[in-house]
Image (tube, helix red, strand yellow):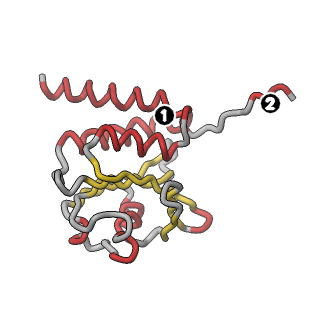
């Protein structure tokens, strides 16, 4: 029964978040959702910019190459990555990752795919150093979010047509 309750809670949290997506830019909606839903120290959304082979964070106003650091590793793997201690991961790069994440924190890295299997971006979730454990709930939440995002991406990623354009 607990498994079903957790599933319903996760679905409810994600769906209420998705309903609010049109109110804010995608990166802010995703960062806000994971900051509140998971006891995290820092959440960064990295947009994929295929034309220049980079990942860009509007909040941090920096970009990194597709193959740099733990975010680049997650991008290339195209699946959820769990890292218990950031600095112990093979892809950790102190120059790239050091200014963004605490070296001793646990990380969840989630490439977000659209309904055509294209990577839209990577979500980097840093757990607090005081609570570094990645729980089963955290992992289930991130996995379900990924599935629902992929299903609804066609609608979530559409640009709204301004009313002025319609009137003209």
Compared across the picture, whether 82 is left or right of 93 comes to left
Can residue 80 be seen by looking at this rendering?
no
Compared across the picture, whether 49 is left or right of 152 comes to right
The mark found on residue 116 in the picture is none
Where is the C terminus found, in terms of image quarters?
top right
Above-or-below relation of 123 to 5: below
Element at badge 1? helix
The residue depicted at 55 percent of the width and 32 percent of the height is 23
Point out residue 121 in the picture as x, y percentages from the top left corner: 47, 53
The residue depicted at 80 percent of the width and 27 percent of the height is 166
Point out residue 40 in the picture as x, y percentages from the top left corner: 28, 48
Q: Which residue is mark 2?
A: 164
Above-or-below relation of 160 to 63: above
Spot the residue most to the left.
1
Total numbered labels placed on residues in the image: 2
Can residue 49 be seen by looking at this rendering?
yes
Compared across the picture, whether 50 is left or right of 4 comes to right
The residue depicted at 34 percent of the width and 71 percent of the height is 98
Which is closer to the viewer, label 1 or label 2? Answer: 2
Q: Which residue is mark 1?
A: 152
Compared across the picture, whether 95 is left or right of 28 comes to left
Give the crowd class for mark 1: few <14, some 14-19, many >=20 residues within 10 Å: few
Spot the residue most to the right.
168
Where is the N terminus found, in terms of image quarters?
top left
The residue depicted at 43 percent of the width and 43 percent of the height is 30
Element at badge 2? helix
| Mark before the other along the chain sequence, 1 or 2 | 1
Point out residue 76 in the picture as x, y percentages from the top left corner: 40, 64
Give the crowd class for mark 2: few <14, some 14-19, many >=20 residues within 10 Å: few
Between the C-alphas of marks 1 and 2, the distance is 27 Å
């Amino acid at each position: 029964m607990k498994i079903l309750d957790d599933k319903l809670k996760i679905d409810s949290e994600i769906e209420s978040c998705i309903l609010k997506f049109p109110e804010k830019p995608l990166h802010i909606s995703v960062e806000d959702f994971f900051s509140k839903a998971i006891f995290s120290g820092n959440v960064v959304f990295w947009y994929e910019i295929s034309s220049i082979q980079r990942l860009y964070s509007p909040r941090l106003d920096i970009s990194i190459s597709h193959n740099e650091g733990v975010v680049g590793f997650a991008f290339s793997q195209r699946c959820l990555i769990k890292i218990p201690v950031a600095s112990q991961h093979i892809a950790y790069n102190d120059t790239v990752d050091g200014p963004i994440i605490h070296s001793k924190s646990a990380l969840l890295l989630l490439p977000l795919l659209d309904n055509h299997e294209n990577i839209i971006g990577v979500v980097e979730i840093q757990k607090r150093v005081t609570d570094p454990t990645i729980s089963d709930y955290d992992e289930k939440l991130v996995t379900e979010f990924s599935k629902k995002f992929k299903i609804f991406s066609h609608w979530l990623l559409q640009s709204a047509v301004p009313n002025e354009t319609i009137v003209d």
